[in-house]
Image (spheres, rainbow, N blue to C red):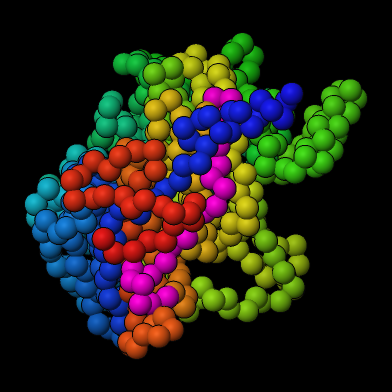
């Protein structure tokens, strides 16, 4: 009976056999003898920004950029070129609704330059400044006409505000402390505040949230001391005029390994120094991974049973099972009920010898992404071990109400997904009351539709082919999937193409941009017609 109900649900749901299908494709040629990189920044229904970066890391030739704004049909609206001053190297980038900002630093000096690109018309403004000391910059944000730079000086954290009006620099107070690490820096345009999370892995694993006004004036310091667990990271989402929710992951033993998710409220009408402990009732709510209904669905049935047996035994003995998960937490998603959290679970891999190049290593990875999501690697236990990248196991989603109560959770198993760096791989889009989750690996796009108590995975992934039937893909590199707008996605990457049997043409290399749409949704533009698929595995072709 249970099998019959499962099959009935599988074949009656409108999402059961759906997948992403091709709509449009644009190709951009590259020169194998030059250092060229492309990057695509999604701008929703306003299109996307395509950045072409040419550089020569073995000479003093300046870095050059070509910025092209494309619409939703991948047609160019405007194009702007920009050249960095000699001896300057791109360092960090940041974007908001109106601009993209690029921060570059000069070799062997404290000089920096800042470029601001207007996304509406391509207007480019440049600014120059000088750091007050030799800083190791790790983060960069802009709010209004002030840029905020975060980094370290002599192993102590430093955050400063740089005015685009007059070039003045102001150092934030209260951060230059020993044994403290910068966790994150967020600009809160809703309340015009800057939030800085710091933590330490020594002593009592202090976790602190500091909030400042745009000019660097301290507003409040919230210390999460004496808590039941060690808070690792946190992201902030406003829920009302006076309150926000701070959500992140926590550990049991002052390590980067996550035991579960925590959620706590921030009251912005409170100022000064505050201390939050679990003695204040529901001040912090902890959701252990073992308390999630579907967290272990990525395991095979036998392994799930073994895990459940171990958890039950530890509970019987009055002990807490310690997990060893590493999390990459996405930006929080506001919902009608409260918020939705999506996080990818991964672990570092090591081997006793340096791994040999694979078919995807014909081209080095692209340079600086617009939004860098990086997590420091764990040091190997022996000098004979070498890093072999990171392996993803699954992605889980949790929805909370405005009071911090867990409403539901679900899980997307990930099969054999690896990367050299722990960066966001799974993209999420809304599909009615469901979530459309997808990721790309080895030129294939895997798709799943996630609901409150359901999950539908396509039987076969979408294979990304060459843009012409006369060619085939010999190698591919740096493939990414980007949630664009609605149920549309962008698949990007580099391809080395050779002629198919029976055709004669020169081999070539290119950067491709593919527009994809979920097959249950009708394309919204007139000239974009999704082809009828004769099989469940589709190949991307020119239209």
Residue found at the far front of this picture: 534
- Direction from residue 499 to residue 29 in the image, left or right: left
Which residue lies at the image location 76% right of the left edge and 67% below the top edge?
A: 382
Residue 220 percent across, percent down from the top left: 40, 25
Which residue lies at the image location 57% right of the left edge and 76% below the top edge?
A: 358
For the question of whether residue 124 can be seen, the reply is no
Q: Quadrant where the N terminus lies?
A: top right
Residue 278 vertical position relative to residue 328 in the rendered view, above or below: above
Residue 132's quadrant in the figure?
bottom left
Looking at the image, which is closer to me, 19 or 202?
A: 19
Residue found at the far top of this picture: 281
User: For the magenta stretch, what is the residue range?
Assistant: 452-472
Looking at the image, which is closer to me, 391 or 1?
A: 1
Residue 422 percent across, percent down from the top left: 54, 55
Looking at the image, which is closer to me, 3 or 343?
A: 3
Q: Quadrant where the C terminus lies?
A: bottom left
- Direction from residue 59 to residue 424 in the image, left or right: right
Residue 535 percent across, percent down from the top left: 48, 54
Which residue lies at the image location 46% right of the left edge and 42% below the top edge?
A: 18
**Secondary structure mostly seen in the magenta stretch:** loop
Does the magenta portion include 174?
A: no
For the question of whether residue 484 can be seen, the reply is yes
Looking at the image, which is closer to me, 283 or 198?
A: 283
Residue 153 vertical position relative to residue 289 in the rendered view, above or below: below
Numbered disc total: 0
Residue 194 vertical position relative to residue 265 in the rendered view, above or below: below
Residue 6 vertical position relative to residue 125 in the rendered view, above or below: above
Residue 353 percent across, percent down from the top left: 71, 76
Which residue lies at the image location 23% right of the left edge and 41% below the top edge?
A: 524
């Amino acid at each position: 009976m249970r099998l019959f109900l499962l099959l009935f649900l599988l074949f009656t749901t409108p999402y059961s056999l759906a997948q992403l299908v091709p709509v449009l494709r644009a190709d951009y040629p590259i020169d194998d003898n030059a250092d060229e990189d492309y990057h695509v920044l999604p701008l929703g229904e306003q299109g996307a920004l395509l950045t072409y970066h040419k550089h020569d890391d073995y000479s003093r030739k300046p870095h050059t950029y070509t910025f092209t704004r494309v619409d939703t049909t991948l047609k160019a609206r405007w194009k702007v070129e920009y050249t960095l001053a000699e001896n300057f190297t791109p360092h960090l980038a940041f974007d908001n609704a109106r601009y993209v900002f690029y921060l570059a630093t000069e070799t062997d000096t404290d000089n920096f330059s800042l470029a601001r690109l207007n996304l509406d018309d391509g207007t480019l403004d440049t600014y120059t400044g000088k750091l007050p000391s030799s800083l190791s910059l790790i983060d960069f944000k802009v709010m209004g006409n002030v840029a905020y730079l975060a980094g370290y000086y002599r192993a102590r954290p430093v955050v400063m505000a740089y005015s685009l009006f007059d070039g003045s620099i102001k150092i934030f107070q209260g951060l230059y402390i020993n044994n403290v690490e910068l966790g994150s820096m967020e600009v809160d345009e809703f309340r015009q505040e800057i939030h800085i999370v710091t933590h330490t892995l020594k002593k009592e694993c202090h976790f602190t949230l500091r909030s400042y006004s745009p000019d660097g004036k301290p507003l409040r310091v919230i210390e999460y001391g004496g808590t039941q667990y060690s808070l690792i990271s946190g992201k902030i989402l406003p829920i009302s005029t006076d309150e926000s929710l701070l959500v992140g992951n926590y550990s049991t033993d002052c390590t980067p390994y996550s035991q579960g998710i925590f959620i706590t409220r921030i009251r912005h009408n409170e100022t000064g120094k505050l201390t939050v402990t679990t003695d204040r009732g529901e001040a912090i709510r902890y959701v252990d991974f073992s308390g999630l209904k579907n967290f272990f669905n990525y395991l095979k049935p036998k392994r799930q049973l073994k895990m459940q047996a171990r958890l039950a035994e530890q509970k019987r003995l009055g002990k807490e099972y310690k997990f060893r998960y590493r999390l990459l937490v996405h930006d929080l998603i506001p919902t009608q009920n409260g918020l939705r959290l999506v996080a990818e679970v991964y672990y570092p891999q090591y081997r006793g010898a340096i791994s040999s190049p694979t078919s995807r290593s014909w081209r080095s990875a692209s340079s600086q992404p617009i939004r860098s999501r990086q997590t420091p690697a764990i040091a190997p236990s022996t000098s004979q071990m070498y890093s072999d990248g990171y392996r993803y196991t699954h992605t889980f989603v949790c929805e909370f109400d405005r009071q911090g109560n867990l409403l539901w959770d679900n899980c997307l198993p990930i099969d054999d997904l690896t990367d050299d760096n722990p960066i966001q791989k799974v993209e999420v889009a809304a599909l009615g009351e469901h979530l459309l989750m997808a990721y790309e690996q080895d030129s294939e796009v895997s798709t799943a539709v996630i609901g409150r108590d359901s999950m539908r995975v396509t039987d076969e992934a979408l294979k990304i082919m060459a843009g012409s039937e006369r060619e085939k893909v010999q190698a591919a590199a740096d493939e990414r999937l980007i949630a664009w707008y609605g149920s549309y996605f962008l698949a990007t990457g580099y391809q080395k193409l050779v002629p198919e049997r029976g055709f004669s043409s020169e081999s070539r290399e290119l950067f491709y941009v593919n527009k994809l749409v979920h097959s249950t949704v009708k394309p919204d533009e007139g000239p974009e017609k999704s082809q009828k698929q004769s099989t469940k595995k589709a190949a991307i072709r020119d239209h």
